[in-house]
Image: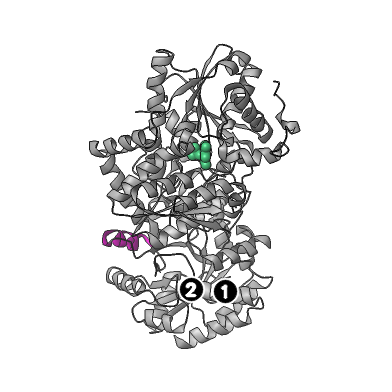
Amino acid sequence: MPVMGEPDAFGKFGDFGGRFVPESLIFACQELEDGFRKAWADRAFHDEFEEILSSFGGRPTPITYCARLSLKLGVNIYLKREDLAHTGSHKINNVIGQALLAKRMGKHNLIAETGAGQHGVASATAAALMGMKCKVYMGAVDIGRQALNVFRMRLLGAEVISVESGAKTLKDAVNDAMRAWVSEVETTHYCLGSVMGPHPYPWMVREFQSIIGKEASLQWEKLVGKSSPDYVVACVGGGSNAAGTFAGFAEATSTLIGVEAAGGAALSFGIKGVVHGMASSILQDEYGQINEAHSISAGLDYPGVGPEHAYLAQINRAKYVSANDSEVLMAFKILSQLEGIIPALESAHGIAWVINAAKTGEIEPGSNVLVTLSGRGDKDVAQVSELLGGFSGAGPGLEEVDF
Amino acid sequence: MNFIDLETHLKSIRKSGRPILVPYITGGITNDWMHLVEELAHLGADAIEIGIPFSDPMIDGPVIQEASNLALQRGATTESILLELAQLNLEIPLVAMTYYNLVLRADPTRFANWCHEGGVSGTIIPDLPPEEMRPLETALDKESIVNVLLIAPSTTDERLKFIAGKSKGFLYTIGVMGTTGERTDLAESATILAKRAKQVTDLPVLVGIGISNEIQAQEVTKVADGVVIGSAFMRRILEDQSGKSALKFFSSLRSAL
Ligand SMILES: Cc1ncc(COP(=O)(O)O)c(C=O)c1O
């Protein structure tokens, strides 16, 4: 049996996953599962999906060798460049797949939740491309810290709905998107942005994102050689770029590392529970109330994690670690200064872990490390400039980093 | 308090020819919420649904969300609510409604114990589908507590039969595709679904979600055996914490049914 295969008949990966939704949504989930199974077994669907990702989405994305950073750290670092995909992150892969599927199923409206705004932008983009209507639910707090993406979504013709419930971040945006979905389910597809939620989402989104890992493993062979990377690293919010990456290496000897935000580390500090339609590892208090996640990156501020990651952790196939805000800011600057790549704050979590692990020797010198750079950092520049002392003048935070 | 069998109790009311009226109240919503529960019983509630607040209530609209947040801010927990209920001595059954994460966090056995202590006759867990209810059902069985299942307008005929076969106590009919909350018009879907349910089950069929006033309650109980009133009642508690206007509203519902 493949490590990252299909979930069982209940949509479970081991003990995790499932379909824990109100009865009103059971039919929609079933219909979506049937639709996805048919589409995914259809060569024509794959052809169309891949054609759009190539002619519109900019795939395949390259692998870049980080010569200066590698020299500094004594390990060989390669980046899978999802930041170069259209709209600036891996989110476009999933969204093109779901929008095509929605059309096939006769649903012409999309709703989506978003944290950093990348999935919202990708959804709005797919909707514009395919002539669909798009509504994006976004926490009021995130709207404040990701103004650029809010404007991009509006420019693309999407309606951005400010979510005022709960902590007003990603988890609450998911709640409100699901609530909206219940009442519009006949005409509307819920375009979920990560490998989470009720079955079939965790499986379906991983399949759409697995193009990252498939491409990377072929590219790796050409670029580096037959032996797989020693480490395959990706950041984990819900876990879609990580799942898509891992899918290409799960059968290989590579050590798989998922890096969560220290303030949202569901796999390190979570407890098994049920939220947003899935059984997974979830940050919660002793009474079972869901905790709010806190990190510098809106896209990783999620108290849960995709169920397949909980499973991969349980069977020890993947290891989950975390990076804190200051390590991430440092990695953000290092990648910019040494490699000319401004990473998304989410993606900088992966880099931050590699830098630390190389310095402590956890990654042996000379190892080959593949990191998925899930997105570009333009959306984060305003926020980071504030943290570093403002746009104008070289604030104290901008001197060359020494590490 | 003394244990009451939910299904037997509701069926006897149905037999008397009176529509079943079940108000919903969020546990811990005010200091004297227990007093409101007692008042509801005195005013003729046939059973009372006690909501145990969850931080992420997926099927609830703004009113129940606000009520849940308030109760949580006041420190309400699964245990505190269920154990407070133990002080009551009512002649009608209580049904605990909550989300599955709270059951899992407590552990199904401990949750079932607390329900038993509180004299609860049944549970409603809207995000726990019948396919996944075995652990809870096993724990509840030991305390003779039943788990009530839900059907929705989107439920297929085949699945409706399956759910009706597994539900105990009554069959909770979600009247409208949407979250809890008041609606100006009674959704046609409520009556249609209640009719479909009545054709396949002898369980009492209660319609909840979206029933907002006397006229809607009268209309839907032409077909259904009864109604659950949630947001329309809770909104009045949020507006007037004394509960006076909520209870007055409930009385007028009772006299209409
Ligand atoms: C650039 C980027 N990377 C990663 C994530 C986290 O999502 P996931 O864990 O599903 O890849 C986001 C989410 O917004 C993102 O924008």
Task: Give the residue pinned by disc 2.
Answer: B182
Is tag 2's residue or tag 1's residue first in the polypeptide sequence?
A: 2
Asked which secondary structure carries label 2, the reply is: loop
Front-most of residues A270 and A219 = A219
Q: Which residues are magenta?
A: B157-167
Q: Is residue A227 above or below residue B225?
A: above
The amino acid beneath tag 2 is: Glu
* Quarter holding residue A158: bottom left
Name the residue located 56 percent from the left edge and 71 percent from the top edge.
B25
Q: Residue furthest bottom?
A: B255
Residue at 41% over, 12% down: A225
Q: Position of residue A291 (x, y in %)?
A: 61, 48
Q: Chain of mark 2?
A: B
What's the amino acid at mark 1? Arg
The location of residue A391, given as percent across then percent down, is 68, 38
Overall secondary structure of the magenta section:
helix
Magenta stretch contains residue B160: yes
Label 2 to label 1: alpha-carbon separation: 9 Å
Chain ID at mark 1: B
Q: Could you say which disc has been placed on residue A270 in the image?
A: none
Q: Position of residue B170 (x, y in %)?
A: 40, 69
Q: Looking at the image, which residue is at 49% across and 84% down?
A: B253
CB-based contact (under 8 Å), mark 2 and mark 1: yes
Look at the image and say whether residue B87 sits in the magenta stretch.
no
Residue B235's label in the rendered image is 1
